[in-house]
Amino acid sequence: MTGKPPPFSLWLREFPYVAQIIASPLRRVKPVGLPREDGAPVLVFPGILSSDSSTSLLRRTLDAAGHLSYASDMGFVTGVTPEAFARAEARLIHVFRKEGRKVALLGWSLGGLYSRVLAQRHPECTSMVMTLGSPFSGNRRANNAWRLYELINDHKVDAPNVPDDPSIKPPVHTVAVWSSNDGVIAPECARGEPCERDVEIELPAKHFAFGAQRQSIDTIIRILDEQLPSAI
């Protein structure tokens, strides 16, 4: 399996963004211009050791841009479990039925694995999948989080207690956003192989900045706007 963890020097540069993630619910949304009138419902999944509070600024900016964002309602995410997947599935089906149309899934880090598997299980509810620095491809230990994952879970990082394989491309439009500046996830694991996604786009941001830095959020929304027509 390919990939190795990013160097320790990149990992250390992630930590200044932790404060921005924690403060996400308190940060103001900056003007984004005229909101689009045909915005999509977007269900946003957070990463490991975080909750929907970490995606608050991202979701509120999506709303300001004219989309209809939804929190995952998964609580505090610690890993990949059948119970968490059941909550995620229920949430997707709820949003799909409420909106009466397919939902775009946006997953940050581990949240991207949930997004990809949900789209595999429920393509009838999903318009597209967009992952942000998600380790869906290659070596499950090619990151600087696998030891922590195994410490807080009852299974190995490459042997989750669910049968799904997140590396399999969902039968919907699938976009992988990755960064060569990522200090947590190996770029090749977040970029994936051509058979594992439709589009790969580099966003030169730190892993913790994907959903916390305003410039990164603006770029993510621009990518979403550009890719949505391909999902229809």
Image (spheres, rainbow, N blue to C red):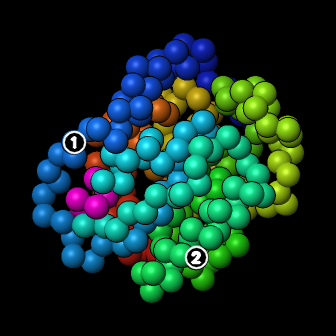
Q: CA distance from mark 1 to mark 2?
A: 30 Å
Q: Nearer the viewer, residue 47 or 176?
A: 47
Q: Is residue 130 above or below residue 79?
A: below
Query: Which residue position is annotated with label 2?
Result: 93
Q: Position of residue 201 (x, y in %)?
A: 46, 50
- Report whether 204 appears left or right of 39: right
Residue at 60% over, 83% down: 124
Residue at 62% over, 44% down: 77
Q: Nearer the viewer, residue 57 or 122?
A: 57
- Of the 4 image quadrants, the one containing the N terminus is top right
Q: Position of residue 222 (x, y in %)?
A: 31, 56
Residue 64 colored in magenta in the image: yes
Q: Amino acid at mark 2?
A: Ile
- The numbered mark at residue 28 is 1
Q: Is residue 75 above or below residue 104?
A: above
Question: Crowdedness of circle 2 by 10 Å Cα count: few (<14), some, many (20+)?
Answer: some
Q: Which residues are magenta?
A: 61-65
Q: Main secondary structure of the magenta part?
A: helix
